[in-house]
Amino acid sequence: MKNIYKHRGRQFIRSPKGKRFSCLDFINEIVNEEEAIYDEHESPEPIFLGEFTSTGYCPCEKCCGKWSNPSNPLTAIGNLAVEGVTIGADWDTLSPGTMLYIEGIGERVVQDKLAKWIVERYDGKILDLYYESHEDAWNHGRQIVSVWLLPDEI
Ligand SMILES: [Zn+2]
């Protein structure tokens, strides 16, 4: 005799003696199964990382110095920098590719690496947002923002 049978998409397990579980065992079995399915489909919650200082930069020489290349603004990971996506961060705090939600700004991806002296000044809690124009980067100014880590699945 099979120890497992299925009914209406659920899987029921017989006891080792071939006797079905008691009513309570069945309920527990169903509850456990539903929890497992729930966990599988539930997106992990964003994790609050705290408050960061955010600044803006563009590919101009004022913002990027020797790395300035407005005609081909590549990030530190080698892709083209995109306004609305690209941010620079401390890679010891937030590794490249990390997706963040920034309060009042939206979702961004860590693609650029910040200079060590900037990271040290803010103790790693600094995000630099990429803008196409220097004016927009300048207008961003310096803001204190709440930041959440977004799980990869989102
Ligand atoms: Zn600039």
Image (cartoon, grey):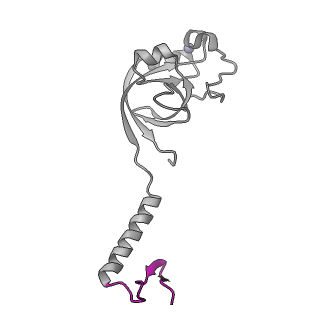
What residue occupies the far front of the structure in this picture?
17
For the image, the number of numbered tags is 0
Query: Is residue 15 covered in magenta?
Result: yes
Q: Is residue 141 visible?
A: no
Given residues 146 and 131, the one toward you in this image is 146
What residue occupies the far left of the structure in this picture?
24
Query: Is residue 9 covered in magenta?
Result: yes
Q: Is residue 49 visible?
A: yes
Instruction: From the image, give the main secondary structure of the stretch colored magenta.
Output: loop
Question: Which range of residues does the magenta coloring cover?
Answer: 1-22
Question: Can you give x and y, in whole percent of width and height, for residue 42 in the image?
Answer: 43, 56
Task: Give above or below for 131 relative to 44.
Answer: above
Residue at horizontal 48 percent and vertical 24 percent from the top: 90
Task: Give above or below for 85 relative to 74.
Answer: below
Question: Can you give x and y, in whole percent of width and height, for residue 32 in the image?
Answer: 38, 69
Residue at horizontal 44 percent and vertical 32 percent from the top: 105
Task: Give above or below for 147 relative to 130.
Answer: below
Q: Quadrant of residue 68?
A: top right
Given residues 147 and 122, the one toward you in this image is 122
Q: Quadrant of ligand 1?
A: top right
Question: Can you give x and y, in whole percent of width and height, for residue 49 in the image?
Answer: 38, 34
Given residues 70 and 18, the one toward you in this image is 18
Q: Quadrant of residue 21?
A: bottom left
Q: Is residue 143 left or right of residue 66?
A: left
Question: Can you give x and y, in whole percent of width and height, for residue 118 in the image?
Answer: 46, 15
Residue at horizontal 44 percent and vertical 65 percent from the top: 37
